Image (spheres, helix red, strand yellow):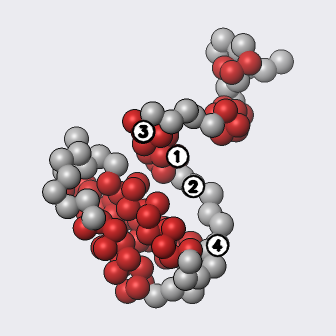
Amino acid sequence: MTTEADEQQAVEHVVARLLERFPSLTEGHIHVIVDEEHHRFDGRPVRDFVPVLVERAARKRLSTEAPSVHLEPDAAELAAADEVRRTDGAEADPMEVTRRGDAEGGDFLFGDLGGRRA
């Protein structure tokens, strides 16, 4: 369960990532957009995925205003996105699962039972 302090810290990380992704926008403008998206979840009982959802919505809004710089997502962002997908009932993208397996050195999708590739 996420505490309010943890959630606020995660939202600050969202702002930092969006500043990197949209370098042509000011920090103040990004804070406004993130705060607006964050307040959309006020009063909702489940808070664990709020920062991920806030980042997704804010990134979508900001992308209509300025070009973005492509950044590789970090491991925490990927894990949180996977968890949101699983709780939404959506299937995991097989190509994404394969790409992550390749990056981690495993190949469970194709019959490897924990050993390394030959």
Find the distance from the CA under tag 3 to the CA under tag 1: 15 Å
Q: Considering only order in the chain, which callout, 2 or 3, is on the residue closer to the N terminus?
A: 2
Tag 3, which secondary structure? helix
Q: Amino acid at mark 1?
A: Leu
Q: Amino acid at mark 2?
A: Pro
Instruction: Name which residue lies at 58% across and 82% down.
Output: 66
- Which residue does the numbered mark 1 point to in the structure image? 78
Q: Where residue 24 sits in the image (x, y, percent)?
A: 57, 86
Q: Considering only order in the chain, which callout, 3 or 4, is on the residue closer to the N terminus?
A: 4
Above or below, 3 relative to 116: below
Callout 3–callout 2 Cβ contact below 8 Å: no
- Which residue does the numbered mark 4 point to in the structure image? 69
Q: Where residue 11 sits in the image (x, y, percent)?
A: 33, 64
- Which residue does the numbered mark 2 point to in the structure image? 73
Q: Amino acid at mark 3?
A: Asp
Dividing the picture into quarters, in which one does residue 43 lie? bottom left
Instruction: Name which residue lies at 31% across and 73% down.
Output: 36
- Which residue does the numbered mark 3 point to in the structure image? 88
Disc 4 versus disc 3: nearer the observer: 3
Instruction: Name which residue lies at 50% across and 68% down.
Output: 59
Find the distance from the CA under tag 3 to the CA under tag 2: 20 Å
Find the distance from the CA under tag 4 to the CA under tag 3: 28 Å
For residue 6, side relative to residue 49 (left or right): left
